[in-house]
Amino acid sequence: MLSLISTLGGLLVSGLPKLLEFFQNKADQSHEIALARLQNEMQLQLAAQGFAAQQRIEEIRTDQVAMESEAKMTEAALKHDEKVMEKASKWAVNYVATVRPTVTYIFVLELVLINIGLAWFLLFKEGLGTLSVDDFIRASDLIFSSDEMAMLGGIVGFWFGSRGWSRK
């Protein structure tokens, strides 16, 4: 049950960036609408009261400039990374692209090796080599624990679930 939940969790987590992007876009749009309304209200108040609210408008403009400069800085950093990768050797670019999958491969390989070691120990250790089928099934519950299957299910759900989310 836990492995099923973690697999579904990995699937959902892999789609989290798209979901967050959707909500960020909604928040940005509502922020822009609210900002436009506020500016219109300020302009009406300025026309009615004179220039008493000029300071608030300048604060709003300052916030807009700050947000735009932050977006430009992020874009510039991404462009810088692209330029660096263009000049880098092919193996360095490939290595950067495979860091996260490599960590996943190492984790899965570790699980496989531990399981093989435990199975070998249970089957060929002196005095334990005469396991019945029932004993072996009970031992396999120790080797393939629900926690381990939950971790593996989460990894598989994340990597293969992200493909489905990226298509949508």
Image: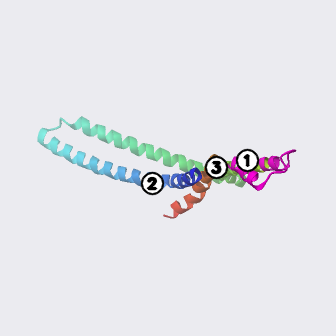
Disc 1 versus disc 3: nearer the observer? 1
Q: Is residue 84 visible?
A: no
Check disc 1 and report the residue beneath it: 110
Describe the element under mark 1 as helix, strand or loop: helix
Rate crowding at label 2 as few (under 14), some (14 to 19) or many (20 or more) other CA atoms within 10 Å. some
Residue 83, percent across and down?
Answer: 60, 51
- Magenta portion: prevailing SS class: helix
Magenta-span inclusion, residue 150: no
Q: What residue is rendered at 53% in x and 46% in y?
A: 77
Disc 2 and disc 1: Cα gap in Å? 32 Å
Check disc 3 and report the residue beneath it: 100
Q: Are marks 1 and 3 in contact (CB under 8 Å)?
A: no
Up the image or down, 30 lies above or below 168; here it is above
Relative placement, left or right, of 121 versus 15 is right
Describe the element under mark 2 as helix, strand or loop: helix
Q: Is residue 148 visible?
A: yes
Q: Which mark is residue 19?
A: 2
- Label whose residue precedes the other's in the sequence (1 or 3): 3
Q: What residue is rendered at 49% in x and 52% in y?
A: 17
